[in-house]
Image (spheres, grey):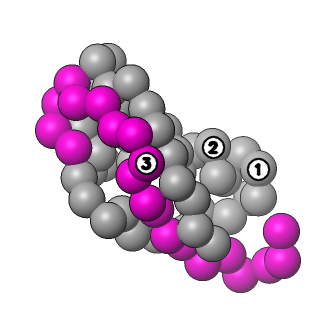
Amino acid sequence: MKLTVEYEGTRYHGWQAQAGAPTIEAALSEAIHDLTGESPALRAAGRTDAGVHALGQVVNFTLQQPF
């Protein structure tokens, strides 16, 4: 699946998942899991640093079951 996302990153420690820190990747992974019951690996076209916003970031992942 392909997602094009935008986010306000002020409260996040960037894109990449980090133990003990809120990140965009972790928040998006949690939302996908809540919707599908799956925890797919996310592949992003780029990464943002802490506090950085995004408009039109592309994210790709594969689900095992049809959604």
Q: Amino acid at mark 2?
A: Ala
Residue 52 painted magenta = yes
Q: Which callout, 2 or 3, points at the residue further toward the start of the chain?
A: 2
Q: What is the crowding at mark 3: few (fewer than 14 residues within 10 Å), some, or many (at least 20)?
A: few
Q: Which residue is mark 2?
A: 31
Give the residues in magenta.
48-67
> Which residue in the rendered view is the most extreme toward the top?
11
* Residue contact between numbered discs 1 and 2, judged by CB atoms under 8 Å: yes
Secondary-structure class at tag 2? helix
Q: Which mark is residue 9?
A: none
Residue 50 painted magenta = yes
Q: Is 32 left or right of 35, judged from the image as shown?
A: left
Residue 3, visible in the rendered structure? yes
Disc count in the image? 3
Residue 47, given in percent of the width and then of the height, sits at 23, 52
Q: Which residue is mark 3?
A: 56
Magenta-colored segment: predominant secondary structure: loop
Q: Is 55 left or right of 13, judged from the image as shown?
A: right
- Marks 3/1: CA–CA distance: 21 Å
Write the residue at 34% across / 38% down: 54
Secondary-structure class at tag 1? helix
The quarter of the picture where residue 1 lies is: bottom right
Q: Which callout, 3 or 1, points at the residue further toward the start of the chain?
A: 1
Secondary-structure class at tag 3? strand
- Marks 1/2: CA–CA distance: 6 Å
Q: Which residue is mark 1?
A: 35
Q: Amino acid at mark 3?
A: Gly
The C terminus appears in which quarter of the rendering? bottom right
Q: From this view, report whether residue 1 is shown above or below residue 50.
A: below
Residue 16, given in percent of the width and then of the height, sits at 26, 50
The mark lying in front, picked from 3 and 1, is: 3
